[in-house]
C-alpha cells in the first residue's frame, strides 16, 4: 500500500491441485488443531516456480480420498467418492475416474 493505493506485485492463478502438497502424516498438507482437520494448506513450491506435488486433478483427488479414509474410514470415503462422481458428472457433463 502506497499513498492509499493498493498495488498487487504478483498474483498466482492456480488450480487447487497446483498449490497443495503432502505432509508426513497425511496424503494432503493440512491445518490440524487438537487432532481435528480444519483446512487444506498450500505448500510454497508454486511461489518459487518449483514442480507441483500433484501432476493433475486426479492425483489431488486420490490424495483427498486417502485423507478421508484415514480420518473417517473406508465407508465414509467410498460414500464421498460416489457423491463426488455424481456431482462432477452433473456439473461438467462428463465422468472423472480416480
Image: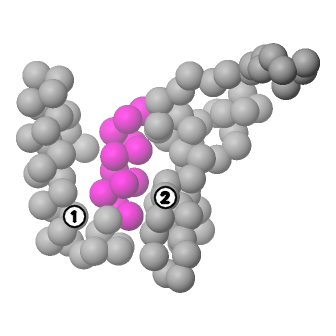
Q: Is residue 96 above or below residue 36?
A: above
Disc 1, SS: helix
Is residue 58 highlighted in magenta?
A: yes
Q: Nearer the viewer, residue 82 or 9?
A: 9
Q: Which residue is mark 2?
A: 39
Mark sitting on residue 77? 1
Q: Position of residue 37 (x, y in %)?
A: 45, 69
Q: The residue tagged with tag 2: helix, strand or loop?
A: strand
Q: Is residue 88 left or right of residue 70?
A: left
Number of numbered discs: 2
**Mark 1 and 2 residues: CB-CB less than 8 Å, in contact?**
no
Magenta stretch holds residue 64:
yes
Please, what is the dominant secondary structure of the magenta stretch? helix
Q: Which label sits in the foreground, 1 or 2?
A: 2
Mark toward the start of the polypeptide (1 vs 2): 2
Residue 49 locus on image (x, y percent):
72, 27
Write the residue at 90% across / 20% down.
2
Q: Residues within 10 Å of mark 2 (few under 14, many from 20)?
A: few
Q: Say above or below: 5 vs 89.
A: above
Q: Is residue 65 left or right of residue 88?
A: right
In the rendered image, the vertical position of residue 62 relative to residue 96, given as above or below: below
Taking the view exactly as shown, the residue that stands out farthest to the right is 3
Image coords of residue 79 (percent x, y)? 12, 61
Residue 14 shows in the view = yes
Q: Residue at x 53, y 61 (%)?
A: 30
Amino acid at each position: 500500500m502506497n499513498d492509499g493505493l493498493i498495488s498487487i506485485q504478483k498474483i498466482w492463478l492456480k488450480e487447487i491441485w497446483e498449490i497443495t502438497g503432502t505432509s508426513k502424516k497425511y496424503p494432503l498438507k493440512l491445518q490440524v488443531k487438537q487432532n481435528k482437520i480444519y483446512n487444506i494448506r498450500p505448500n510454497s513450491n508454486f511461489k518459487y516456480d518449483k514442480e507441483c506435488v500433484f501432476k493433475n486433478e486426479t492425483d489431488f483427488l486420490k490424495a483427498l480420498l486417502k485423507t478421508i479414509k484415514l480420518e473417517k474410514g473406508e465407508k465414509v470415503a467410498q460414500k464421498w467418492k460416489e457423491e463426488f462422481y455424481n456431482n462432477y458428472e452433473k456439473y461438467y457433463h462428463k465422468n472423472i475416474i480416480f
